[in-house]
Image: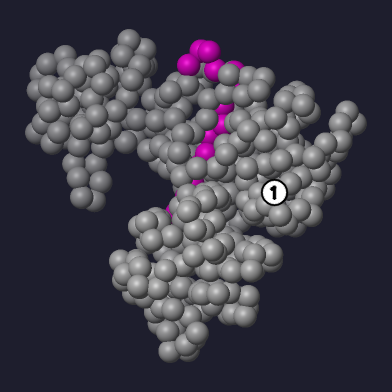
């Protein structure tokens, strides 16, 4: 079949409503979309995907096309996947919340979804499926049983949030914050702002509503002229309990006043919790259910995760790192009461020409007297090894692992923070 059109393709999708883009994972009767990238060409694996169980293969190179009903030839596989996802999304009249931001968007998405799930069958982005491929795949998993959807949208270049908004068509939007991240792809902080704002622009143009942090002046300014619901200055405040690494919160409303015991670390997560409370309340989730949902939520995948080993307490924040999130993590960690603090930092990636300056800024944040050991890993941090003799610098995680094994860390409170590619989790056996 050649260029059947989205309506015809959607009929096929309704018959075989399971999508795969990985020829190594081919569930029976699924549809294989042969995506292409810099180092791979899915068209080459279409036949193998069909042999392994896929019912249909969608390809965009005629050389791999066979005049059989199992093959669908289109002009562009990625574009077709995105259009199919948008067509599918338009079959639903349920509230769809789009979420983006520099830091905290995944945690906030999970908190919002946990809260909303107390009342609604809520569909939400799994993991970090938040890009030009992940968003369409997430949308295509929506079904008629779902009553709400929370769609995370990430970006590393200008215009991407606008593109994802046009696919997901959210009626509600939230930006967690806007900071310095992916500067190599964006070119400047101003370009980051413009790209994140594309969600606000879409919501404004389509008559939707925004959830906006009232304590964030930038977001308040960017959201002017759009109907918005504010959060951030009521209902929930921090309890000054330093006996635990987890946030203890005071929840106050017309109906309740209660201490909330979370499993989340880091004061910077307070505004993420406030967002979840605001959105839950807006959609009618009761205070009691909101509190229980927040207490139940436990971070995973190395995001603000607390892990206790035989000898140490670890704060794992290794999924991602940029200057904004790194500074917040260090400031929070330095304020803790632990007698033996150790910080292990990995390079921040995708900063381009800003890399040297931003890594130097991070090193200047440290009050070295507060730490038992400071360990910095990666080529960017290594540039300052002679300037900061009291900090341990290592070019790679493997080298740091060897040195920590020779000089073990025990009875300590340890922060691990760095970009995912630094693989700081490889240090855990020695911690």
Find the magenta span and give its range: 143-157
Q: For the point 58% across and 74% down, which residue is it?
A: 371
Q: For the point 25% across and 46% down, which residue is it?
A: 37
Query: Does 82 sit left or right of 146 as displayed?
Result: left
Residue 200 appears anywhere in the view: no
Q: Position of residue 143 (x, y in %)?
A: 48, 16
Residue 144 appears anywhere in the view: yes
- Residue position marked by numbered label 1 in the rendering: 247
Classify mark 1: helix, strand or loop. Answer: strand
Query: Does 290 sit left or right of 360 as displayed?
Result: right
Say whether residue 391 is magenta: no
| Mark 1, other Cα within 10 Å: few <14 / some 14–19 / many ≥20 | many
Q: Main secondary structure of the magenta part?
A: loop
Q: Position of residue 182 (x, y in %)?
A: 46, 60
Query: Does 114 sit left or right of 125 as displayed?
Result: right
Say whether residue 151 is magenta: yes
- Judge whether 362 appears above or below 383 on screen: above
Q: Position of residue 19 (x, y in %)?
A: 32, 24
Q: For the point 20% across and 50% down, which residue is it?
A: 39
- Judge whether 281 appears above or below 99 on screen: above
């Amino acid at each position: 079949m050649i260029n059947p059109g989205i309506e015809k393709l959607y009929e096929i999708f309704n018959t075989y409503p399971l999508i795969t883009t990985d020829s190594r994972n081919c569930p029976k009767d699924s549809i294989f979309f042969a995506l292409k990238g810099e180092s791979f060409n899915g068209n080459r694996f279409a036949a193998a995907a069909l042999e392994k169980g896929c019912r249909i293969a969608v390809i965009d190179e005629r050389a791999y096309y066979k005049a059989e009903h199992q093959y669908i030839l289109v002009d562009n596989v990625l574009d077709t996947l995105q259009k199919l996802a948008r067509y599918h999304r338009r079959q639903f009249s349920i509230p769809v919340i789009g979420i983006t931001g520099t830091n905290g968007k995944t945690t906030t998405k999970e908190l919002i979804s946990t809260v909303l799930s107390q009342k609604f069958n809520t569909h939400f982005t799994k993991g970090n499926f938040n890009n030009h491929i992940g968003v369409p795949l997430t949308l295509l998993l929506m079904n008629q049983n779902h009553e709400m959807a929370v769609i995370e949208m990430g970006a590393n270049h200008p215009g991407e949030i606008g593109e994802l908004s046009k696919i997901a068509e959210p009626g509600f939007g939230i930006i967690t914050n806007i900071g310095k991240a992916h500067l190599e792809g964006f070119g400047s902080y101003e370009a980051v702002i413009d790209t994140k704002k594309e969600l606000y622009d879409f919501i404004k143009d389509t008559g939707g509503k925004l959830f906006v942090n009232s304590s964030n002046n930038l977001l308040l300014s960017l959201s002017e002229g759009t109907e918005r619901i504010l959060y951030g200055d009521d209902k929930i405040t921090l309890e000054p309990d330093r006996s635990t690494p987890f946030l203890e919160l005071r929840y106050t409303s017309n109906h309740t006043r209660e201490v909330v015991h979370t499993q989340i670390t880091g004061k910077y997560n307070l505004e993420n919790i406030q967002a979840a409370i605001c959105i839950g309340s807006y959609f009618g989730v009761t205070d009691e259910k909101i509190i229980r949902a927040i207490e139940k939520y436990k971070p995973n995948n190395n995001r603000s995760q607390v892990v206790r080993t035989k000898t140490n307490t670890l704060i794992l924040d290794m999924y991602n790192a940029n200057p904004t999130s790194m500074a917040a993590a260090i400031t929070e960690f330095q304020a803790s009461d632990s007698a033996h603090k150790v910080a292990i930092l990995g390079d921040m990636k995708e900063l381009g020409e800003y890399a040297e300056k931003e890594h130097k800024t991070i090193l200047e944040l440290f009050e070295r007297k507060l730490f038992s050991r400071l360990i910095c890993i990666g080529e960017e941090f290594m540039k300052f090894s002679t300037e900061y003799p009291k900090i341990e610098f290592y070019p790679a995680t493997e080298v740091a692992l060897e040195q920590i094994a020779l000089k073990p860390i025990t009875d300590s409170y340890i922060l691990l923070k760095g970009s995912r590619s630094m693989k700081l989790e490889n240090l855990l056996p020695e911690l």
